[in-house]
Amino acid sequence: MAKKKEKFVVEKEIFDEHIQAAGLRRTAQRNLILETFLETEEHLTSDDLYFLVQKIDASVGHTTVYRTLKLLTEAGLAREVRFGDNKTYYEHHYNHEHHDHMICTECGLVIEFFSPDIESLQDQMADNFGFKPTHHSLRLWGVCAECQRAEKEAHTTPPGAQPRVRVRTAMH
Ligand SMILES: [Zn+2]
Ligand SMILES: [Zn+2]
Ligand SMILES: [Zn+2]
C-alpha cells in the first residue's frame, strides 16, 4: 500500500530553510497555516486565513497567522497584493507565473490576467526613461461583465464618486 503522499513537499522545504535561517522552528501551527494557505487558490487577507485555520484548530492565534504569512512572504511562497480597499491580500507566489489583476468595484471579483504585449510595452517604456524595473503590479479597477448586466436596470454610480471596493474572497 502506498504511503499517503505528503502535500506541498517543496514548499515545506523552502519554508523550513527560511525559518531555520531566521532561527525559528517549524511548529504544528505554522505547518497548518502553510497548508491552509497553499490549499486556497484565493487572494486572502490575514483575517481570511485566520478564519480558515480556526475551523481546523481553534487554538491558533491571530498573531501567529499574521506572522506566518509574513514569513511565507519573506520565503517567496506568498506575495502581497493590494486591491484599493486598504487591506493586504496574499496570494501564492512560488511556482505561480507573474500576472496582473482587474478588480470589480461593485462585487469585488478579482480577475487575473497576463499579457505578453503589455509586459513588453512596460519594459520598453521603462527603457525609454533609462529605468530598470524590478517588479510591477498592474491593476485595473472597473465593473465586471456580470455587474454590468445587473447595472443595466439599476442606477449607476454618480460621476466623481469614490470607487467602492469590496473584494470577494472564499469566505464572504
Ligand atoms: Zn504584469
Ligand atoms: Zn462585479
Ligand atoms: Zn493574483
Image (spheres, grey):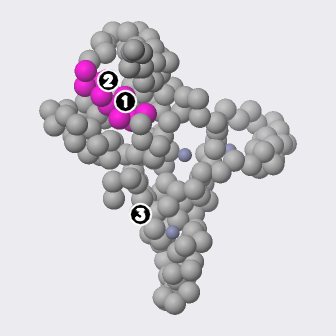
Describe the element under mark 2 as helix, strand or loop. Answer: helix
Based on the picture, tell me whether residue 29 belongs to the magenta stretch: yes
Location of residue 55 with respect to 106 vertically, above or below: above
Quarter of the picture containing the C terminus is bottom left
The residues bearing labels 2 and 3 have C-alpha atoms spaced at a distance of: 30 Å
Disc 3: which residue = 166
**Which residues are the magenta region?**
28-38
Disc 2: which residue = 31
Q: Main secondary structure of the magenta part?
A: helix
Q: Mark 3 is on which residue type?
A: Arg
Based on the picture, tell me whether residue 110 belongs to the magenta stretch: no
Q: Are marks 2 and 1 in contact (CB under 8 Å)?
A: yes
Name the spot of residue 88 as percent of width and height, x first. Answer: 41, 46
Which mark, by number, is residue 35? 1
> Dot 2: within a 10 Å radius of its alpha carbon, few (fewer than 14), some, or many (20 or more) residues?
some
Corner quadrant of residue 71: top left
Q: Please give the name of the residue rendered at 35% of the width and 35% of the height, measured from the top-left corner.
A: 36
Name the spot of residue 64 as percent of width and height, x first. Answer: 25, 30
